[in-house]
């Protein structure tokens, strides 16, 4: 027992703690996730966040100490996103024939995802900064933070909304598609994947990749399109509104 305590004291004060805790918790939870046939309610991203956050709270380890080690995994997010281009390259001929329709779907889907959240926030009479922070909720967190800052929102809050949106999509997407009776043929999987990437960005794309390769490819495409479209349109629309109503 004393050896364990000494090991804990050592790890909790070094960058090795964040790296070790993240890998161990995710690997264990992912193993459970696989054993239950990838039930979305046991999504390893969600439960890893809850377990690690609870551990930090109970033990009193600061987030800064944790992230000093977890940042090595954070760095890998960039290469992981770039790797999503490979399945798209394999389907390049198919994408060329559908690109016009996909651009329209991505624009309309992103607009509905954003406006529905804003409308609900207004109905609940939330503060203006909170409403503005919800606008980029369906864009991956780093980009959502930049967009939020440019339109007067709270970047940190937008990051939270973005992560929550991704998790909700990953948890409920399967049941929504079943309710809507989206088929599980080739076309159905591409539609499911594109919808997941449009609404739930990287976390939704990760879930889609686990379920079906075609769904994963189209989810990665939708994720990238939302980054570009939202980065261009949202600040542009707000700038126009500001010019019309100084």
Image (cartoon, rainbow, N blue to C red):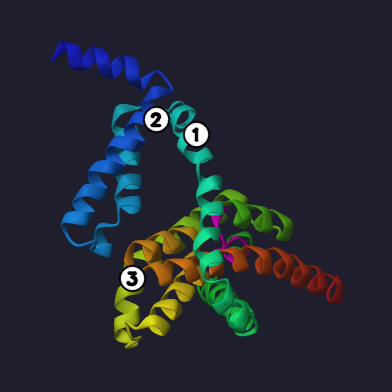
Outermost residue, bottom side: 181
- Report helix, strand or loop for mark 3: helix
- Tag 1: Cα neighbours inside 10 Å, few (<14), some, or many (≥20)? some
User: Is there CB contact under 8 Å for labels 1 and 2?
Assistant: yes
- Tag 3: Cα neighbours inside 10 Å, few (<14), some, or many (≥20)? few
34 part of magenta stretch: no
Write the start and end of the magenta stretch as one range: 131-141
Pick the quarter of the image with the C terminus.
bottom right
x, y (%) of residue 170? 37, 65
User: Is there CB contact under 8 Å for labels 3 and 1?
Assistant: no
Q: Is residue 204 left or right of residue 26?
A: right
In this view of the protein, can residue 168 be seen by the observer? no
In this view of the protein, can residue 101 be seen by the observer? yes
Q: Is residue 49 left or right of residue 239?
A: left
Residue 71 — which label?
1
Residue ID for mark 2: 18
Outermost residue, left side: 1
Residue ID for mark 3: 172
x, y (%) of residue 145? 62, 53
Q: Earlier in the sequence, mark 1 or mark 2?
A: 2
Alpha carbons under labels 3 and 2: distance apart: 29 Å
Alpha carbons under labels 3 and 1: distance apart: 29 Å
Alpha carbons under labels 1 and 2: distance apart: 8 Å
Name the residue at 29% across, 32% down: 58
x, y (%) of residue 139? 57, 62
Is residue 80 or residue 115 the one in the foreground? 80
Residue 108 — which label?
none
Q: Earlier in the sequence, mark 3 or mark 1?
A: 1
């Amino acid at each position: 027992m004393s050896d364990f305590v000494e090991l804990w004291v050592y790890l909790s004060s070094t960058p090795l703690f964040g790296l070790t805790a993240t890998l161990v918790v995710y690997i264990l939870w992912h193993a459970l996730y696989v054993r239950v046939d990838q039930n979305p309610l046991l999504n390893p991203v969600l439960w890893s966040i809850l377990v690690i956050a609870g551990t930090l709270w109970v033990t009193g380890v600061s987030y800064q100490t944790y992230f000093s080690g977890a940042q090595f995994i954070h760095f890998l997010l960039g290469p992981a996103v770039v790797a999503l281009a490979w399945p798209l390259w394999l389907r390049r001929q198919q994408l060329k024939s559908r690109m016009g329709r996909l651009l329209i779907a991505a624009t309309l889907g992103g607009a509905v995802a954003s406006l529905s959240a804003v409308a609900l926030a207004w109905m609940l009479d939330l503060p203006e900064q909170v409403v503005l922070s919800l606008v980029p909720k369906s864009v991956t967190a780093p980009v959502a933070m930049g967009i939020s800052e440019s339109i007067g929102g709270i970047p940190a809050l937008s990051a939270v909304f973005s992560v929550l949106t991704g998790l909700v999509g990953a948890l409920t997407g399967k049941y929504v598609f079943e309710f809507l009776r989206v088929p599980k043929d080739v076309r159905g999987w591409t539609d499911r994947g594109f919808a997941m990437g449009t609404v739930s960005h990287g976390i939704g794309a990760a879930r889609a990749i686990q379920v079906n390769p075609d769904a994963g490819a189209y989810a990665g495409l939708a994720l990238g399109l939302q980054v570009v479209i939202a980065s261009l349109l949202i600040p542009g629309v707000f700038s126009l509104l500001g010019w019309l109503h100084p």
